[in-house]
Amino acid sequence: MKEFKNKVAVITGAANGIGLELSKEAAKRGMKVVMADIAENDLNIAFDEVKKISSEVIKVVTDVTIFEDMVDLSKKATDSFEKVDLFFNNAGVVVPGPIWEIPNKDIDYIMQSNVYSIAYGLKVFIPLMMKQGTPAHIVNTASVAGLLSSPGMPTYHMTKFANVGLSESVNYQLRAINSNIKMSVYCPGFIQTDLNHCDKRRPKRFEIDKNDPYYTSQTYKDGLKRADHVINTGIPIDSVGMSVFQAIEDEQFYILTHPQYNPVIGLRVKTILEGKNPDISIFKK
Ligand SMILES: NC(=O)c1ccc[n+]([C@@H]2O[C@H](COP(=O)([O-])OP(=O)(O)OC[C@H]3O[C@@H](n4cnc5c(N)ncnc54)[C@H](O)[C@@H]3O)[C@@H](O)[C@H]2O)c1
């Protein structure tokens, strides 16, 4: 997609961080913008911010873990703007902690927020875009955590590897049928957003059970501290909109914005191909 003016962008997770930045960039480029998020108050504030750039913006309170909400989002987008040209399947969360200690609720929460949401988004928006038949583009937000693994946040890696695999396979299917829909998978490293505070925006059914001792444990506190550290030392948010839109213009499938991780991705692949075992010492340097 080279021309954005008067086209329609739908963005999930639009109330904060990357989603808000993408909403602002879409508005700056003359697009009609549909901002979707579960956090109504945050969404109202973010909406007012984007409204200052463009009058053609709507907001839709959406829980991406619920398929019917995704359908409702697509209907509200087409009711207002008739079509969808660009879809950012972006909302996501993080859950720290070792797999053998975290409550099952946390596993369900991260799987539904980061994996089911992406699958639901593709299920709803691909047929709609196919029917339109005009050039369209979908960007799935994964992470560099979907291309390499580390000892921190294993369930996050679990979901982000799933995002990359799903995006690659669906992209092959779309290319095989010469589809009008292009696809990208966005794999950034750490960025200063509000991701470390995602617990305050959990859907009701995944809310933290204050009676569960895990959530007062040192493990949980250490996990939160680590999340604070990596997000607060990430790159500033302001380059995100430009770099992602440039990649869409260039029809780039893999969008990588943190070159410092490329050697680690390369080392992982080399280790696999050479039949070696993962070496923890690379994380101790
Ligand atoms: N910040 C980083 O360092 C980083 C790095 C790589 C990938 N990512 C990914 O980027 C995406 C956006 O994260 P961010 O860093 O901007 O975080 P953020 O917390 O600042 O923004 C995420 C937004 O998603 C919304 N959200 C969460 N669950 C939702 C749900 N069920 N339904 C609808 N909206 C929901 C939140 O309310 C929030 O507004 C995520 O998929 C995240 O995994 C972030």
Image: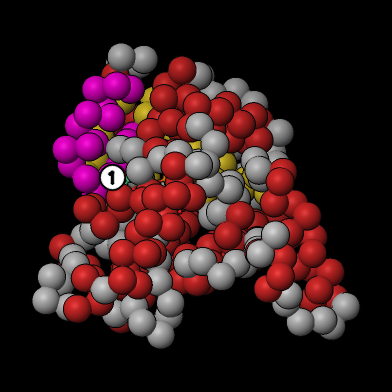
Q: Residue 190 versus residue 58: which sits nearer the camera?
A: 190
**Rendered residue at 50%/42% (across/down):** 233
**Rendered residue at 75%/52% (across/down):** 262
> What secondary structure is found at the residue carrying circle 1?
strand
Residue 143 shows in this picture: yes
Magenta stretch holds residue 128? no
**Left or right of residue 207: residue 64:** right
Q: Position of residue 145 (x, y in %)?
A: 58, 60
Q: Specify the farthest residue to the left.
A: 211
Instruction: Write the start and end of the magenta stretch as one range.
Output: 34-50
**Left or right of residue 285: residue 242:** left
Q: Position of residue 218 (x, y in %)?
A: 31, 71
Q: Residue 17 versus residue 211: which sits nearer the camera?
A: 211
Q: Position of residue 98 (x, y in %)?
A: 43, 77
Q: Is residue 221 above or below residue 243?
A: below
Q: Ligand 1 within 8 A of label 1's CB?
A: yes
Q: Residue 73 versus residue 276: which sits nearer the camera?
A: 276
Q: Quadrant of residue 120?
A: bottom left
**Rendered residue at 52%/41% (across/down):** 234
* Dot 1 crowding, Cα within 10 Å, few <14, some 14–19, many 20+: many
Q: Residue 173 versus residue 93: which sits nearer the camera?
A: 93
Query: Residue at label 1?
Result: 37
Q: Is residue 6 above or below residue 84?
A: above
Q: What's the coloring here?
A: secondary structure
**Rendered residue at 42%/55% (across/down):** 227
Magenta stretch holds residue 44? yes
Q: Specify the farthest residue to the right.
A: 274
> How many marks do you count on the picture?
1
Residue 134 shows in this picture: no
Q: Quadrant of residue 36?
A: top left
Q: Is residue 170 above or below residue 244?
A: below
